[in-house]
Image (cartoon, helix red, strand yellow):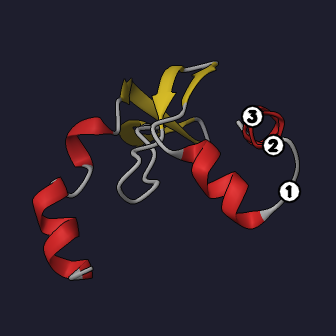
Amino acid sequence: MMRDTVNKAGGTDTDKLLAALNDAKFDTVVGPVTMRGLDHQSTLGAWVGETTLKGKAGTMKNVKYEDGTPYLFPEAEVKAARKD
């Protein structure tokens, strides 16, 4: 994601990097990820499950990937908190 952002920005200038992140879309090993333009929050999710023991080692069961989109703060709430 960083490589793609730097390439799109044409370098490492902060303002250009921020502009390149606005609604940027990336293909990742877990699927597509978008950076929300409003606040640059990512839709990248996480693997979740139940912790358990397998012998003496910790492991997880019932593992699934949860997309991050439903967990982002609503845009109206972000705008209200920023008051810009």
Q: Residue at coordinates 21% horizontally, 82% vertically from top-left?
A: 83
- Residue 36 is left or right of residue 27, and the answer is left
Tell me whether the residue at label 1 lies in contact with that at label 2, contact meaning CB atoms closer than 8 angstroms. Answer: yes
Check disc 1 and report the residue beneath it. 12
Q: Are marks 2 and 3 in contact (CB under 8 Å)?
A: yes
Q: Residue 18's quadrant in the figure?
A: bottom right
Q: Amino acid at mark 2?
A: Val
Q: Position of residue 70 (x, y in %)?
A: 20, 39
> Residue at left 71%, top 54%?
16
| Circle 1: residue type | Thr
Q: Position of residue 23 (x, y in %)?
A: 45, 37
Disc 2 crowd, CA 10 A, few/some/many (<14, 14-19, 20+): some
**Which residue is the extreme one toward the right?**
11
In the depicted structure, whether residue 46 falls above or below residue 15: above
Secondary-structure class at tag 3: helix
Mark 1 vs mark 3, CA separation in Å: 10 Å
Instruction: Tell me which numbered mark, 1 or 2, is placed earlier along the sequence.
Output: 2
Q: Which residue is mark 2?
A: 6
Tell me where residue 12 appears, x and y as whole percent.
85, 56
How far, Cα to Cα, is label 2 from label 3?
A: 5 Å
Image side of residue 13 versus residue 82, left or right: right
Q: Which mark is residue 8?
A: 3
